[in-house]
Structures are given as C-alpha cells and as structure tokens.
Amino acid sequence: ELLANTSGIFLRTSWVELYASKTMLVLFGTGYQWNFRSSTQTTYLCAFHLQGGAVSPKAIGSVPGDLLDQFSIDHKDNYLRVASTESGPWKRFDNIEGGRGRWAQETNNRITVLEFPDEGDGFNKSVLEEVGFIDGLGERFERIFAVRYVGDFAYVVTFLRTDPFYIINMSDATNPTRVGELKISGFSNYLHAVDDETLLAVGQEATDDGRAIGLQLSMFNVSNSSDPTLISRFTVEEDDDSWSWSDAQFEHKAFRYFSSLQKIILPASIYGKNAFDGFLVFGINETNDIVPEFNISHTSYYRGCTNLQPRSIVVDKTVTTFKGNTVKNHDLMNGTKIWDVDLDENRAKDDCFWWW
C-alpha cells in the first residue's frame, strides 16, 4: 500500500524551485520590486520536515537577493545556509572597465545563515531567524555563478571577467568568515566534491574581457582552506573558430564522476571546425592531470521524435550514454563500442523535422 501525505503553503512568487536534504524539503522562489530608481529582490523560503514518509510544515523565511539554483542552499544541523545575489537596477556607468557607457548592475553577493525555530515554540516562532551572514563576495558587478557546501565550508564562484573562487568557513553559524581565495581566468558553473580536499569544476575558459571561449574542466585542492590551489585544467576548445559547452554547466545530473576508476563523463557540444555532439570521457592520472581518453558521438540529424536528455550510467566498467535519439554502451577502460540503439530507427523521417 502506498501512503501519501500532503501539506500546502502559499509563497509570494509565481516561480518555485526546491532543495531537499534527508530530513528537510525547502521550496524557494524570488519576488521582485522594480522601478527605474531602485530594484530589490527577496527570496522566500518555506521548509517542510520529512520523517517516516510524512511531510509537515516546519518554518518560513526570506533572504535578500535571488538564488542561482538548489546548490545555493544547504541544511546542516539546525541551520539553513543560503547564498544569494542582490542586484540593483540597470544603469549606465562611464567609469567601468570595458568601455565608456557600459550598462551594468551593482551587485552584492552574500551567504545568510538562518536558524530553525525550536519545536513547540508555536506559530509566532515558525519563522527562520537570521543568525549570521557574510556579504561583499566578488568584485564589483560580479554575480554568483556556482556554490557548493562541503561540511563546514562553502565554496563560491563569482564572475564578470575573472573567476574569484572563495572559501567560506561556516563552522560558526553566527560568524561566517572568508578564509581563502583564488583568482583565475574563466568561470565555473558546477562544483563537484570529489572528497573533502578536492573539487571538480565544469565551466568556461574566458578572455580578459569576460568573453566565454570554450568548455573547461578544472580541479582544485582545498585541503588548505586559506590557500586553495588549481591542480589542473583542460579546455575543450579555445580558438576563435570554435565554441563548446556542456549540459552539465546547468544540470548536475548530466555530469558523472566515477571515483573508483577516476573517470569523468561529460556531455559536450562543439561548434565550428571540430563540430561534435556527444560525451567526452576523461581520466585523472597519477599527477592529478585531467587527461582526455575517448569521445562518444551522439550526433542527431532529426529531432521531434525521441530526444533523450544527456545522461550516463556506469556498470561493470562499461558506460551507457543517453542523448538525443541514441543509447550507446562502451568499455570505459579503452573506449571500445559494445552496442548501440537508435530509438528512431524504424520511424519515418516525415514524423520528425530536420535539425542538424
């Protein structure tokens, strides 16, 4: 018998995303107040307690600014840690790097720590209370591009022209402290914790003026929180005639790191003279370099029929990849194709429309 439990709430916004831990579900959405002289954003949060298949309302709260995604939130002990970006109205700045008369928004990037109310405090105590915060993360006009919480630390990437990578010590909920910083070119969109001392990042290399030029993998050593270092990087395409990107920059389920074999499986699309659509497989060698090993092509010529989102599964040292209208299986150790399936093989081309 399938048991279901429901609970409802009203949020003052039309768009809601969610974050979940083992015991907490948080719905969050951003509301905007805007005019030509001012612009404010507030993200509203509603937390539900998860226990034994039951869902019960826990607390409501808010933080200034808007959130990037679910990785902007973390539930630890009796606290929510929330990373957000406050943005002012668009204005023309004549003294900004990159040319006179550039339009931009003043920003403030921050992490707010909210405490859950004690059990039995009643309705008046069902509000998440701010107990600590840190702001001023990033250079002028920069926004948060990636966040990851690991234990007592938050890792934050901001970007406009360079990639400041910040480490925030969150061990004291009332006093989050910036303890480390690393400035490098490009930016990261997704941070993946390999272990407590190593992060993998998926993003873009960029020019000095902030123009993205190619998909990039980076590995960081954060064992010394006050002195993070870049271990290795690999840029897929970085010439003027090509451009590349990955679904993993915006959808973490598209990324796969198989720790026991130290393999990275990354969907990628390359446009230009080396055009490619499929998956790139990387290894990590003895010196922690990111090394390209083989590619799996999933080029689709017709869309409108089967269109699988890019995903990968590893079983018994083989990798099965899904993208577009094809499913393929390869030996993960040497790249040999074992089998593939075209899900549109027996469909009339008239059922689909030309894409590639």
Image (cartoon, rainbow, N blue to C red):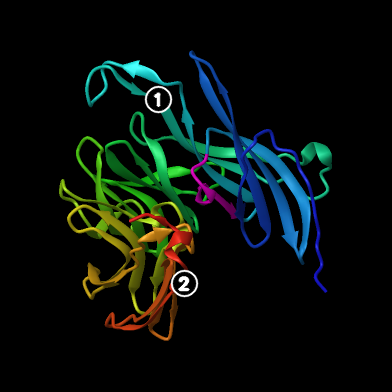
Between 127 and 352, the one nearer to me in the picture: 352
Q: Is residue 155 above or below residue 160?
A: below
Which quadrant would residue 197 be assigned to in this image? bottom left
Direction from residue 64 to residue 336 in the image, left or right: left
Q: Residues within 10 Å of mark 1 (few under 14, many from 20)?
A: some
What residue is rendered at 35% in x and 64% in y?
266
Direction from residue 348 to residue 275 in the image, left or right: left
Q: Is residue 105 above or below residue 335?
A: above
- Where residue 294 appears, as percent x and y from the top left, is 25, 73
- Where residue 48 appears, as percent x and y from the top left, is 72, 51
Direction from residue 110 to residue 318 in the image, left or right: left
What secondary structure is marked by label 1?
A: loop
Give the residue at mark 2. Answer: 343
Give the residue at mark 1. Answer: 105
Q: Is residue 183 visible?
A: no
Q: Which residues are magenta?
A: 67-75
Tag on residue 70?
none
- Where residue 247 appears, as percent x and y from the top left, is 40, 56
